[in-house]
Amino acid sequence: MRLEVAFLEEVLAESILTAKKEEEADKLCDLKDVTNFVRGKKLTFWHVIECSDHVILAHICNDDTPWIKYSVVVKTNLTLTVNVAKASVKQLGSKMVVPSSIDSKRQQLELLERIEGFDSAQRSSSENSTADIFETVASLLN
């Protein structure tokens, strides 16, 4: 019985240590972490623009005249803003609320993937639909 208890305590300690290591590896501490993580993921939807006090993650549309459709601006304190064209938004559509800051790689990747998914859904649905137009306008006004 004592052997089983000792074994369970050892397994539990290893599990806690592994969880702490994973949490530490997932943590974003500064803009360099943000930049390195996005570049390491090789996300084709996003372009990284480094500035001295912030990082811009931009989706550039290559129409006749290139323009930035979506941008995520991350400041040194890891607060962020999401923009659609030139308008700052707090949510995209009716379901995606934009966080005010990020502190983990998982959270950052989820945000970028959700914006990309929102864009894909917008393109695949009827672009002339009145409901789509109202939803987009409403998200820009919020």
Image (spheres, rainbow, N blue to C red):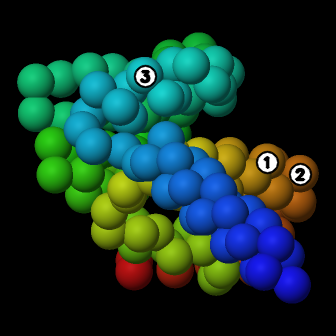
State the image quarter where residue 99 is shown: bottom left
Instruction: Look at mark 1 in the image and give the residue it sits on.
Output: 120
Q: Which mark, by number, is residue 78? A: none
Q: Nearer the viewer, residue 93 or 106?
A: 106
Q: CA distance from mark 3 to mark 1?
A: 25 Å
**Identity, as a three-letter code, of the amino acid under mark 1:** Ser
Task: State whether residue 54 is above or below residue 93.
Answer: above
Q: Which mark, by number, is residue 36? A: 3
x then y, percent, for residue 142:
39, 80
Q: Earlier in the sequence, mark 3 or mark 1?
A: 3
x then y, percent, for residue 19:
59, 58
Decide if residue 22 is on the left or right side of residue 50: right
Residue 130 visible in this rendered orientation of the protein: no
SS at circle 3: helix
Q: Which quadrant, please, contains the N terminus?
A: bottom right
**Identity, as a three-letter code, of the amino acid under mark 2:** Ser
Residue count near mark 3 (Cα–Cα under 10 Å), binned few <14, some 14–19, many ≥20? few
x then y, percent, for residue 7:
78, 67
Q: Earlier in the sequence, mark 2 or mark 3?
A: 3
SS at circle 2: helix
Decide if residue 62 is on the left or right side of residue 39: right
Disc number lying in front (2 or 1): 1
State the image quarter where residue 57 is shown: top left
State the image quarter where residue 8 is shown: bottom right
The answer to whether the residues at label 2 and label 1 have Cβ atoms under 8 Å apart is: yes
Task: State whether residue 103 is above or below residue 63.
Answer: below
